[in-house]
Amino acid sequence: MSDIIDLLRTKAEDLIASINRAGGLRATVDALRRQMAISDRRRAVARAKADIKRLDEQITDLVTAVGLQTVALHEAGRLGIPELDPLCAQIVELRATHHDLEQELARLEAEAEAAARAQQAESRCPACGRSVEAGLRFCPYCGATLQPANRSCPYCHSPLRPQARFCSRCGRPVDKPSPAGASGSGEG
């Protein structure tokens, strides 16, 4: 057993000696040192960038605070710097426009919501006249079709609107029975 250990020890020493003679171990250590130095520089760069970003954010926050304070002084009539008065007046005007637009948006959203509720409330079955939930394809009371199935053009396969008689893409007539009394009048 000791012969095997001695043999392994001798082989390991020979391997280390050959690496040292060829400069392999030293080159490996030097390469590792270079890689560590590169990593250290990269970490330092990332740290510096993070510090700069943090300082930029602080500067932006302080400039905003100064601006807000200046506008507040202008609105209170206590700003005694004539160079800043036009800028402050423009900010006050923009705030008023912003407020008006927010009110307009709230009004439009309320109208859209009311219209959606009205449309849902007005959905009625054409066969039995009962109120049905919007979006259903069949009446839950009488089974009548509430919405036509999705159709497509038999020629170009483009989607068609429910009452379309011609394809909006290729212009060809589509196979749909025309409403009563509307067949071919005016052509000759």
Image (cartoon, rainbow, N blue to C red):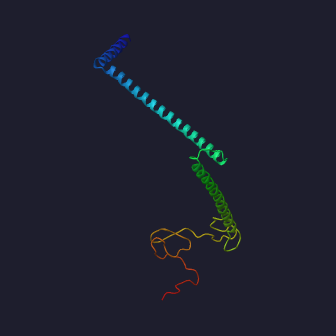
Instruction: Report which quarter residue 42 is drawn in.
Output: top left
Depth check, front residue: 171 or 48? 48
Depth check, front residue: 182 or 157? 182
Residue 136 x %, y %: 64, 65
Identify which residue is drawn at 69% across, 69% down: 122
Q: Is residue 19 left or right of residue 104?
A: left
Query: Measured along the vertical axis of the image, is residue 7 above or below residue 58?
Result: above
Instruction: Report which quarter residue 108 is drawn in.
Output: bottom right
Residue 128 x %, y %: 70, 73
Identify which residue is drawn at 53% across, 74% down: 164
Q: Residue extending furthest right?
A: 130
Identify which residue is drawn at 61% across, 69% down: 147
Identify which residue is drawn at 52% across, 87% down: 186
Residue 137 x %, y %: 62, 67
Q: Is residue 7 visible?
A: yes
Query: Measured along the vertical axis of the image, is residue 21 above or below residue 185?
Result: above
